[in-house]
Image (cartoon, rainbow, N blue to C red):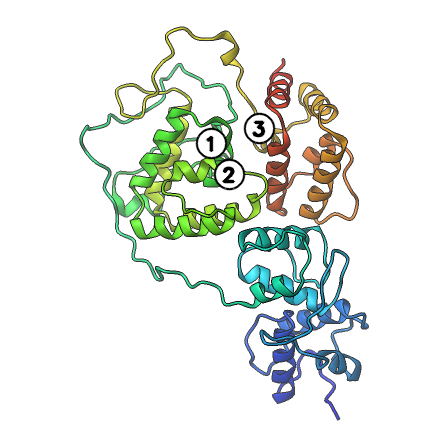
Amino acid sequence: MDSILRQGSKGSAVAELQQLLQSKGFYTGKIDSDFGAGTTNAVLKFQKANGLVADGIVGSSSWAKLRAVVPTASSQGLPTLLPGSKGSAVAQAQQLLKDKGYYQGRIDGDFGMGTRDAIAAFQRANGLTVDGKVGEQTWKKLQAPAIADVTSPVTFVEIVRPSSPSPTPVTPAPSATPTPSIFVPTPTVTPTASTDPATSISNPAIPTANAISLVNAANSYSRAKLPSQTAALNNLQASIAPEILQQFFQRWQVASGQATTATSLQDAFSGYNSAQMLNQNLALQWLQSQLLPQAIDQFRQDWSNLNAGIGTGTPFTPQPSPIPDPTSQLQLINLTDAVKVYKRDANQVTALENLQVSIPIQTMQQFFQRWSLASEQTVIAISLVDVFQDYDSQKFSSQITALQWLEKELTTANLEQFSRDWQTI
């Protein structure tokens, strides 16, 4: 007779329980024979996903469900999963997708929109029919071993920027106040980085509120491709170890579903798009995690200074236009920048309302569904004003991904009119 287990239980029966939960994708902790909080949470998720009373106590009903066909990499007859499916097979697919970097949500055994998008991205990257379903071929690919990292661990070596020609430190002119732009997050405070290597790592000069990330830079570059931005990317690439670049390009190829590997950051950032955005973001976040603090700090400084047109006499200074075009003075504002400074001003509300009217209803419905999932809400939003009001980067980091998806659906005319409305005084 099976033991009745609950939090606080110990012994071989608990170890068996943990192994069964792990095989079904509900438990990721150690097999330590100790029924602690992690095991309790896994039991609750399993019970909920399998229609059992979610009480955290493992009795005969829970044991029977746990032992009913444990799926493994060699198992046959796994069910075809569709949007709306529930249960342990869905949880297993979610765990496999998460292990391969395609799924960022909760392992809840519920086949929702987030799971469907992750499956579609995985199928696209692996040459499968993109139908958002988990059939035989998708199961086989999911269960195949992931490609191991080529360079692990990596020993970082400080890379000194070329000294010829010797660049003059670029600092903003005291009287110049750059206008906020889609391409330039405006830092509120930009401290000067220490030249002492011992202090530059412990106290890097990175603006915490509006410092641009590689994800934001890729989103901007895919739209603009300004020569000055290209210079900043080339400068960043020169500071990255070749083995790190190679590994990033491999990750980018898989994330983008491309047949050929990119050979430069410029090529990679040019291919940033809404279809593969979720997986491309993961690759970009991985690359940023591999950079030395000095390298990303310098990139942020180059990107901001170059796009604001600050400084002269350096290799990164954009060539001035001999005859400025008055229409080029419009500073474009994207949604991911706008949401961070939203104060519910009258012109901001008007800009959002006008933008929503100009976007097809089907596109807005898809966005609101994505936003609700990203915000873990049960109620679907009905307006961009509500969306901006509900933005909370501390709790829901996926909200930015949802906004980036909507940005990719905007036309140039949409973006220009929104920027014009937003900046109206």
Residue 204 image position (x, y, % from top left): 36, 42
Kind of residue at badge 2? Tyr
SS state under label 1: helix
Residue at position x 68%, y 33% from top? 388
Q: Earlier in the sequence, mark 3 or mark 1?
A: 1
State the CA–CA distance, disc 1 to disc 2. 8 Å
Q: Is residue 334 left or right of residue 133?
A: left
Q: Residue at x 51, y 29 (%)?
A: 223
Q: Do the numbered discs 1 and 2 sit on residues whose CB atoms are within 8 Å? A: yes
What residue appears at the point 26 percent right and 38 percent down from the top-left corner? 195
Q: Which residue is mark 1?
A: 221
Where is residue 78 shown, x and y percent of the image? Answer: 68, 71
> Tags 3 and 1 in contact by the CB under 8 Å rule?
no
Of the 4 image quadrants, the one containing the N terminus is bottom right
**Dot 3, how many residues are within 10 Å of its Cα: few (below 14), some (14-19), or many (20+)?**
many
Seen in the picture, residue 269 relative to 108 is either above or below; the reply is above
Of mark 1 and mark 2, the one earlier in the sequence is 1
| Mark 2: few/some/many CA within 10 Å (<14, 14-19, 20+) | many
Tell me the distance, in whole angstroms, between the alpha carbons under discs 3 and 1: 12 Å
